[in-house]
């Protein structure tokens, strides 16, 4: 897939340091690097997940200044987290090449906003390149390092989901040994931002450097023109393939002239201006914002070119991922495909035996036992698997905003005078990523708040990457594991309870006792991810005694566990899916659910 191609490209370029924070659709880049170095087929660069994107960015920036080619990976919102050092990195520059991979998610499929990270190139004054398929993802990764070292600045490589996750054959070359001699020289003008006069001077130098990038587009073959028709198409990224497919399928290549841009910022103005002079109309095909469309219209206006330019502002849907049908309907001037099948909604569930099921069950009953109705007490959610608690049967969380926001937003409700208890739920990885500072604020201000940290010992939603609690990294490096409880206690929290979400009654009682107490309370809901538990082996599973089951559906309605299935007259358990958590057994009013050894016939 495209992400694997990026990893191969980085090793071909001789990457020495790679870091990032997992986030779909970018995660497989570092996962692939870790697999490749574990195979011992390549020299062993430093490849490790970081606690968040800002830390990962600064690790890679420091490595680059020491002479090591570096790669930092993240999804679109991760660049928001890393934006502070991103902007300063243009002023400091780099020594060895530094590539910033940011994977956007048109649609979106797995992201809280439909962010277009191309704008960061303008904001940070850094070059932005964009591949259109896995082969280009491989080639552009290598080119990115060459460009970075030529201009001594980091380079942003922006991708989208269809490039990251598209599978195709990729021709690769031999990996380069990342040998270098580490060094670092003192240079206050470049590396210290405390002197405003130097910052102003450095700003001018950054702009001059950025201006020098435009002519390099031809050197690095980042743009190309195809066809000779009178109607122009300007495109970049995955949608370039849609354009080609539509034109080839309908025999229309002769009618259009295509400018395929690989350098997005700075816009190669000379190449674009020459293209605009040769066509009468231009259709801009891009994702997500009308970024290129706006740029082209401004350039045409400044150059006094009589050419009509239209794209996402007029022709295409303003939101969502572009499809082949979208492109075809515009290029053929037809209505969108009326044969599109509207598939029924299928929201993703929590996994069978997921400990978050037990946490939400305990919260629901504990809040009820404390005298409140379910749905009366705000539960501020965060980003991770537990956000699936928004779906039935729990419909638990009221918000899911950004990494670490649950605690801060819950605190905001309380300081605004909200009269009832407020709960914040956050995962262990998200807590390490961005929740620590929020908890510090809540502790320091002694806010009446119940924080539930769901500790499943992994970054589950993105592929089970390690958290700071691991003793050994995926690369085999020994690490010092942190204790989540000790971290929370070290931040000043005093009312801390470590609870097992599989022990339903105990968890309910913990919530009931804490919810109305004044001050900050923390429940660490600790139980390993059910998928990890299945990998290590599950000895027991649950089964339903058909003689006792009344088909009351209490187990289904209370847990929503996907291992439970409805037969004609009763409920049954899919043994291959069950992890033996016993949550369904604990809520069955007729004691119809029992435990047995896996494979045992009942």
Image (cartoon, grey):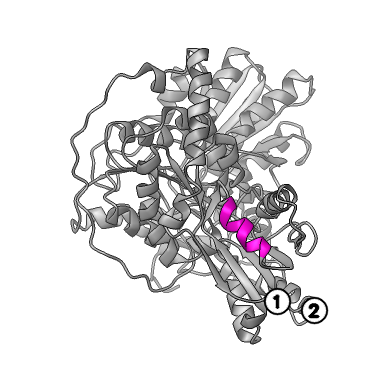
Above or below, 133 against 502 in this view is below
Question: Which residues fall within the magenta stretch?
Answer: 269-277
Q: Residue 22 in the image: x percent, y percent?
A: 46, 47
Name the chief secondary structure element in magenta.
helix
* Vertical position of residue 219 compared to residue 513: above or below: below
Say which element carries label 2: loop
Q: Identify residue for label 1.
A: 328
Residue 551 included in the magenta stretch of the image: no
Which numbered marker is on residue 334?
2
User: Are dots 2 and 1 in contact, CB under 8 Å?
Assistant: yes
Q: In this view, does 202 lie to the left or right of 111?
A: left
Q: Is residue 449 left or right of residue 579?
A: right
Mark 1 is surrounded, within 10 Å at the Cα level, by few (under 14), some (14 to 19) or many (20 or more) other residues, namely many
- In this rendering, the answer to whether 267 lies above or below 231 is above
Residue at 56 percent of width and 57 percent of height:
271
Q: Residues within 10 Å of mark 2 (few under 14, many from 20)?
A: few
Above-or-below relation of 485 to 309: above
- In depth, the one of 62 and 582 nearer the eye is 62
32 vs 232, nearest the viewer: 232
**In the depicted view, which residue is nearer to us: 202 or 161?**
202
Camera-side residue of 115 and 542:
115
Could you tell which of marks 2 and 1 lies nearer the N-terminus?
1
């Amino acid at each position: 897939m495209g992400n694997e191609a990026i990893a191969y490209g980085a090793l071909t370029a001789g990457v020495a340091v790679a870091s990032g924070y997992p986030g779909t659709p970018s995660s497989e880049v570092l996962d692939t690097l870790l697999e490749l170095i574990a195979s011992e087929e390549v020299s062993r660069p430093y490849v490790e997940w970081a606690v968040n994107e800002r830390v990962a960015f600064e690790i890679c920036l420091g490595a680059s200044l020491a002479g090591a080619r570096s790669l930092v990976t993240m999804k679109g919102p991760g660049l928001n987290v890393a934006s502070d050092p991103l902007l300063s990195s243009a002023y400091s520059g780099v020594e060895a090449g530094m590539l910033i991979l940011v994977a956007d998610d048109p649609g979106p499929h797995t992201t809280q906003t439909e962010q277009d990270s191309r704008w960061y190139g303008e904001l940070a004054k850094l070059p932005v390149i964009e591949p259109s398929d896995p082969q280009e993802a491989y080639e552009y990764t290598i080119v990115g390092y060459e460009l970075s070292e030529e201009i001594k600045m980091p380079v942003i490589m922006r991708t989208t989901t269809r490039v990251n996750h598209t599978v195709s054959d990729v021709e690769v070359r031999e990996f380069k040994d990342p040998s270098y001699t580490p060094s670092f020289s003192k240079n206050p003008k470049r590396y210290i931002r405390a002197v405003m006069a130097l910052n102003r001077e450095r700003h001018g130098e950054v702009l001059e450097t950025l201006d020098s990038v435009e002519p390099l587009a031809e050197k690095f073959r980042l743009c190309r023109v195809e066809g000779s028709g009178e109607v122009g198409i300007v495109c970049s990224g995955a949608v370039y393939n849609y354009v080609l497919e539509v034109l080839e399928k309908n025999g229309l290549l002769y009618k259009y002239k295509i400018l395929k841009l690989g350098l997005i910022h700075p816009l190669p103005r000379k190449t674009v201006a020459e293209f605009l002079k040769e066509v009468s109309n231009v259709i801009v095909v891009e994702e997500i914002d009308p970024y290129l469309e706006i740029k082209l219209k401004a350039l045409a206006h400044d150059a006094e070119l009589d050419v009509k330019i239209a794209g996402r502002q007029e022709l295409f849907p303003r939101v969502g991922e572009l499809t082949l049908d979208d492109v075809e309907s515009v290029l053929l001037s037809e209505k969108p495909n009326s044969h599109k099948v509207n598939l029924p909604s299928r929201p993703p569930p929590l996994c069978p035996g997921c400990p978050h099921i037990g946490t939400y069950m305990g919260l629901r009953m504990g809040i009820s036992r404390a005298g409140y109705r379910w749905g009366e007490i705000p539960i501020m959610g965060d980003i991770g698997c537990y956000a699936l608690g928004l779906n039935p049967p729990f419909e638990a969380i009221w918000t899911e905003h950004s990494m670490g926001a649950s605690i801060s937003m819950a605190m905001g409700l309380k300081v605004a005078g909200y009269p009832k208890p407020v709960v914040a739920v956050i995962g262990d990885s998200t807590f390490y990523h961005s929740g620590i500072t929020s908890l510090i604020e809540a502790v320091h201000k002694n806010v009446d708040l119940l924080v539930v940290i769901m500790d499943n010992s992994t970054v589950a939603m993105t592929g089970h990457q390690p958290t700071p609690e691991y003793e050994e990294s995926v690369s085999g490096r020994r690490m010092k594991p942190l204790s989540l409880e000790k971290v929370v206690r070290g931040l000043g929290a005093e009312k801390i309870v470590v609870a097992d979400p599989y022990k339903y009654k105990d968890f309910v009682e913990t919530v009931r006792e804490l919810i109305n107490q004044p001050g900050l309370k923390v429940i660490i809901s600790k139980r390993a991810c059910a998928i990890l538990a299945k990998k290590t082996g599950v000895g027991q599973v649950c089964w339903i005694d058909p003689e006792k089951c009344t088909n009351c559906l209490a187990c289904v309605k209370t847990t929503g566990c996907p291992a439970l299935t409805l037969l004609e007259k009763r409920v049954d358990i899919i043994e291959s899916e069950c992890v033996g958590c016993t949550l369904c057994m604990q809520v069955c009013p007729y004691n119809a659910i029992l435990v047995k050894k896996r494979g045992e016939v009942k």
